[in-house]
C-alpha cells in the first residue's frame, strides 16, 4: 500500500507507549490517516502529554495491572485494534519481563475482550539473536501474539536516528568519535521516527503486511559506525577524529560487574547494561541469514525518505534535538556501543 493511497475507513485504536518518540510519530501517522487513537499513559507521565498530537484521546492507568488495563484503558468499550510501541526502559531482566512480556500479555487479553481483531507490535531486529533478557522477553510475547488467532504485524526496525546521535555533542566539543574495534564490526540501516511511524500505520491498513514479521530499515546503504563518524565530520567540515576502543574493555567491565553482582544485587543490572552495550558493539542491526549466520544488508528492507545524514545536518544546524525520553538510561549505555535499535 502506498502512503498516498486513499484514506481507509476510520478504526478505533488503543495505543500503548505513545509518549516515546516512536509512539508520538505513530500516533501522528494514525491520526493523519483518519483513525481514532486512544492512548493509555502512566499517570506520572503526564508531564510528557503535551508532546502528543492534537486529536489523541488520553487515558491514564497502569499497563502492568490487568484490571487497570481493562478499567482505565479499554473502559468496557469496543476497539478495532491495539497498537503498541511500549518497551522496557532499562532492558534489565525484571523490567524487561514486566513490560516487554507481561504487560503486553495482559494488554492482549484485555484487547480480545474489547473486540480487537488486529495488533501491530513494535519489536526490535536484535531479537534474531536473543542473548539478552529483554530480547527473550520480546520473543516470548511475539510467540504469544502469533498464536492468538488475531491478525498481527510484528515490526522489527533497525537502528533509530536518535540512537546513533549520542556522540554528536562530544564531536562538536572537539572530542573524538568512539568506535569499537576498527569501526566496521557492525552495520545498520537507520530509520527515522516519522518514517517508522508511517510504516506502523500502514501495517494497520495493508493486508499484505498482516500476519508477518517485518524487519525494516530506512533508505540508503547500510552504515558502519566508522561511516557514521566520517559522515558527521564531513558535515562539520573537519577531518575525521576517531578513537578505537577494544571490545575486550567491555568484556572486562562485564566480568567485574558480574562478580560484584554476586555480593551486591545493585550491580547485576549494571552488568546487564554492560552486556547490552557489548551486544550492540558486536552485532549488526540487519536481517540475519539463518543459513549462514551472517547479517545481510541486501535482505534488509528499506522504507521512507529521511536519511541519517539529513538528521545529522539538522542536529548540527540546531533544527533538531535528540530526545531519549523515558528510556535514556538504557539508550545512553547502548549509544556508547554505537547505538541501540530497540524501540525504546
Image (cartoon, rainbow, N blue to C red):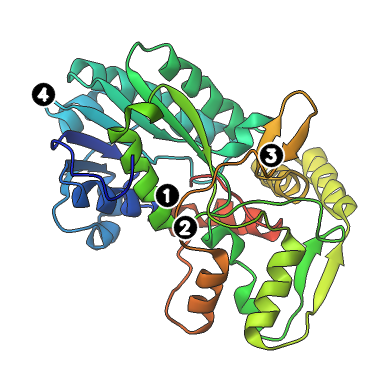
| Residues at marks 1 and 3, CA–CA distance in whole angstroms | 33 Å
* Helix, strand or loop for disc 3: helix
Mark 2, residue position: 192
Question: Between 114 and 268, which is closer to the camera in this rendering?
Answer: 114
Q: Who's the residue at 61% across and 32% down the image?
A: 127
CA–CA distance in space, label 4 to label 2: 35 Å
SS at mark 1? Answer: helix
Residue at the disc numbered 3: 268
Residue at screen point 29% across, 24% down: 118
Q: Is residue 33 above or below residue 333?
A: above
Foreground label between 4 and 3: 4
Contact flag, marks 1 and 2 (Cβ < 8 Å): yes
Residue named by callout 1:
196
- Work out how far the residue at label 4 is from the one at label 3, CA to CA, in angstroms: 41 Å
Per the image, the residue denoted by label 4 is 76
| Callout 1 crowding tier (Cα within 10 Å): few <14, some 14–19, many ≥20 | many
From the image, state whether disc 1 or disc 3 is nearer to you: 1
Q: Give the mark nearer the N terminus: 4 vs 2.
A: 4
Amino acid at each position: 500500500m502506498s502512503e498516498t493511497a486513499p484514506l481507509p475507513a476510520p478504526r478505533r485504536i488503543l495505543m500503548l507507549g505513545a509518549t516515546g518518540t516512536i509512539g508520538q510519530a505513530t500516533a501522528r501517522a494514525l491520526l493523519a490517516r483518519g483513525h481514532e487513537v486512544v492512548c493509555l499513559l502512566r499517570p506520572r507521565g503526564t508531564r510528557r502529554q503535551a508532546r502528543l498530537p492534537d486529536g489523541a484521546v488520553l487515558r491514564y492507568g497502569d499497563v502492568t495491572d490487568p484490571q487497570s488495563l481493562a478499567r482505565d484503558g479499554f473502559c468496557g468499550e469496543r476497539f478495532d485494534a491495539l497498537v503498541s510501541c511500549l518497551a522496557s526502559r532499562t532492558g534489565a531482566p525484571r523490567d524487561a519481563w514486566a513490560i516487554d512480556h507481561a504487560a503486553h500479555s495482559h494488554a492482549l487479553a484485555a484487547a480480545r475482550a474489547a473486540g480487537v481483531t488486529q495488533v501491530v507490535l513494535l519489536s526490535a531486529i536484535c531479537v534474531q539473536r536473543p542473548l539478552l533478557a529483554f530480547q527473550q522477553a520480546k520473543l516470548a510475547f511475539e510467540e504469544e501474539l502469533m498464536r492468538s488467532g488475531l491478525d498481527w504485524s510484528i515490526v522489527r526496525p533497525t537502528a533509530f536516528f536518535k540512537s546513533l546521535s549520542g556522540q554528536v555533542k562530544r564531536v562538536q566539543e572537539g572530542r573524538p568519535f568512539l568506535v569499537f574495534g576498527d569501526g566496521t564490526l557492525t552495520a545498520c540501516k537507520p530509520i527515522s521516527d516519522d518514517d517508522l511511524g508511517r510504516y506502523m500505520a500502514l501495517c494497520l491498513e495493508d493486508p499484505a503486511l498482516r500476519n508477518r514479521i517485518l524487519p525494516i530499515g530506512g533508505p540508503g546503504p547500510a552504515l558502519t559506525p566508522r561511516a557514521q563518524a566520517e559522515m558527521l565530520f564531513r558535515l562539520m567540515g573537519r577531518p575525521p577524529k576517531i578513537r578505537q576502543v577494544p571490545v575486550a574493555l567491555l568484556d572486562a567491565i562485564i566480568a567485574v560487574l558480574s562478580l560484584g553482582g554476586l555480593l551486591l544485587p545493585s550491580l547485576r543490572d549494571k552488568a546487564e547494561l554492560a552486556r547490552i552495550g557489548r551486544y550492540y558493539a558486536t552485532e549488526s542491526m540487519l536481517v540475519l541469514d539463518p543459513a549462514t549466520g551472517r547479517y545481510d544488508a541486501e535482505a534488509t528492507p528499506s522504507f521512507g525518505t529521511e536519511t541519517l545524514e539529513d538528521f545529522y545536518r539538522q542536529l548540527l544546524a540546531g533544527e533538531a534535538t535528540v530526545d531519549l525520553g523515558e528510556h535514556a538510561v538504557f539508550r545512553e549505555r547502548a549509544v556508547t556501543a554505537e547505538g541501540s535499535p530497540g524501540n525504546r
